[in-house]
Amino acid sequence: EEQLVESGGGLVQAGGSLRLSCAASGFTLDDYAIGWFRQAPGKEREGVSCISGRDGSTYYTDSVKGRFTISSDNVKNTVYLQMNSLKPEDTAVYYCAADRVPVRSPLQPYEYDVWGQGTQVTVSS
């Protein structure tokens, strides 16, 4: 069974950093893209970043470029999202999701079939 488990969320002050982890089981990252998404209360789920396990291509939404970095460890079957210079508007539940490559729209939630349970990130001002 394909599963994703997120960890690493928490409460941090503005300007701080967090690293989220997404551990995959039941499949290997080599043939999948892993995306990070977030959903704040009352808002739609939005794509934050994506990495292709096949060729390492990365994608970011404009609001996190230069602050967030996605990476993968295919030996550990885990994808990371390093979040620096956090802002209160980054507060949301963060989810990782997986889909077989190629993914036509890497930051669109409808592309992804397997989802984790989410981890809360709260940035205080």
Image (cartoon, rainbow, N blue to C red):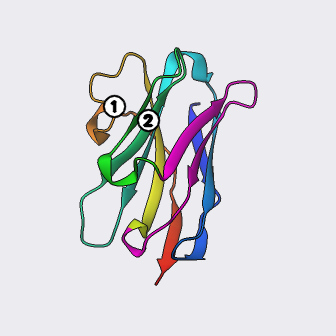
Q: Residue lying farthest right?
A: 75
Q: Residue at x 34, y 68 (%)?
A: 40
Residue assigned mark 2: 50
* Amino acid at the residue labelled 1: Pro
- In space, the residues marked 1 and 2 are separated at their CA atoms by 6 Å
| Circles 1 and 2: CB atoms closer than 8 Å | yes
Q: In the image, 26: left or right of 123?
A: right
* Amino acid at the residue labelled 2: Cys
User: 5 or 69: nearer the eye?
Assistant: 69
Q: Quadrant of residue 93?
A: bottom left
Q: Is residue 99 above or below residue 88?
A: above
Q: Is residue 122 magenta?
A: no
Q: Is residue 26 above or below residue 15?
A: above
Q: In the image, 92: left or right of 28?
A: left
- How many residues crowd around disc 1 within 10 Å: few (fewer than 14), some, or many (20 or more)? many
Q: In the image, 83: left or right of 48?
A: right
Q: Is residue 87 above or below residue 24?
A: below
Residue 12 rendering spot, x and y as whole percentages: 59, 75
Q: Is residue 3 above or below residue 119?
A: above
Of callouts 1 and 2, which one flags the residue occurring earlier in the amino acid sequence?
2
- How many residues crowd around disc 2 within 10 Å: few (fewer than 14), some, or many (20 or more)? many
Element type at mark 2? strand
Which numbered marker is on residue 84? Answer: none
Residue 100 rendering spot, x and y as whole percentages: 43, 20
Residue assigned mark 1: 106
Residue 2 rendering spot, x and y as whole percentages: 56, 31
Q: Residue at x 55, y 22 (%)?
A: 53
Q: Residue at x 24, y 72 (%)?
A: 42
Magenta segment range?
A: 67-89
The quarter of the rendered structure image containing the N terminus is top right
Q: Is residue 84 magenta?
A: yes
